Image: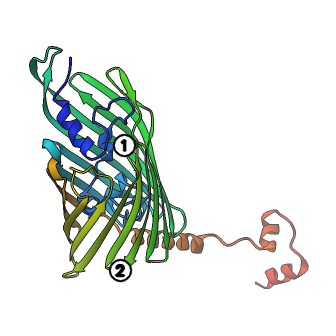
Amino acid sequence: MRMRGVSAVIAVLAGLQAPALYAGAGSDGAAFLKVEAGARAAAMGGAFAAVSDDAASVFYNPAGPALAQNNELLLSHAEWLEGLRNEHAAYVHVVSARLTLFTGLTALIIPALDEYDSAGVNTGKFSALDGSAGAGLALALGSDAYFGLFGKTVYQQADTQKAYAYAADLGFIRNYGETVRVGLALQNFGTPIKLHTESFDLPRTYRAGGAYRVMNRAWLTMEIIKAGQSDLAVAAGAEGEYSITRRETVFARAGYKTGRSRNAGPGVSAGAGVRSGDLGVDYDFSPFGDLGDTHRFTLSFRFGKDREDILTEQKIKRASRVKQAPAAKTKPAREKAKGAAPDKEDKSIYFLW
């Protein structure tokens, strides 16, 4: 039985110079793992491995959650190409000044596709769904270096065929002062995924990038990306912010990424965002030429204590334990506790007392 309806999806991903969703020989499986996550990162061209400092970092650099200042919940929806919908959800939980736990979920929802038999007769429709879910941790290695690990399960389903794979991401971030940040990430290293009768490797992804903070008001970032068997790509992005009040801040973003085919648009992206207190809303627009346009919306909510407050509390508790610790016994006290007779000087002082 041939599933010709998949050809539309194949055309979409092929136009991005990414392998087909249901890959052919010599290509990657689970190509949905290459799709950008979150409106902020997507608007910056996907150059996010170094900037990573919010819940979206779960999908770009697992060391990034260590830079989050609060617990954060992120929900992202994308009206992608050819009727495909791309969903992301992430949660970051600040445990201590050094340890952060997080979880992430990705889903590519594919519209019903036509199904044909070997004679080319339409026999109805079938559904397809791809996704991944996992959890990880990020650690602060001192005051300027951060490490993260993310383990996940990858799932693909087409009609009655289902497939699973298991993978891990590793990430590292290093701050140089308050203006320069470097990020490295290795993603999707794991088992092959087997759909129907063929197995395919996951799209192993390498990210190396740097970011520069301008006057504490803007990020400039650039990144080199190698995703599976796709060609090497270069991404660059910028984000500027302006505070309207103490609680309200607006953001403007733009980005560019190489590697698209001739008919898949120029590789540019742009977006905007607003944060009011703990609530943030972001939008991204990415044109894909003949394939259409993509619109992303992200909602994020921060809550809980600031990481700096947690660090201060830990310092106070340590100082309190030191002050409350019992003083060490003096030599006469130790001798008395052992039943030994005190010396003459000690005895006279004891008698007078």
Q: CA distance from mark 2 to mark 1?
A: 33 Å
Between 35 and 245, the one nearer to me in the picture: 35
Quadrant (top left/top right/bottom left/bottom right) for the N terminus? top left
In the rendered image, the residue lying farthest to the front is: 262
Q: Residue 29: in sight, yes or no?
A: yes
Colour basis? rainbow
Q: Residue 249 location in percent, x, y? A: 21, 76
Q: Tell me: residue 70, above or below residue 205.
A: below
- Lateral position of residue 213 relative to residue 320, left or right: left
Q: Which residue is mark 2?
A: 216
In the rendered image, the residue lying farthest to the bottom is: 352
Q: Amino acid at mark 1?
A: Gly
Q: Residue 273 location in percent, x, y? A: 20, 68
Dot 2 falls on a residue whose secondary structure is: loop
Q: Which residue is mark 1?
A: 134
Dot 1 falls on a residue whose secondary structure is: strand
Q: Amino acid at mark 2?
A: Asn
Q: Residue 277 location in percent, x, y? A: 22, 72
**Residue located at (31% from left, 33% from top):** 155
- Lateral position of residue 305 relative to residue 206, left or right: left
Q: Residue 280: in sight, yes or no?
A: no
Q: Residue 164 location in percent, x, y? A: 35, 30
Q: Tell me: residue 164, above or below residue 71.
A: above
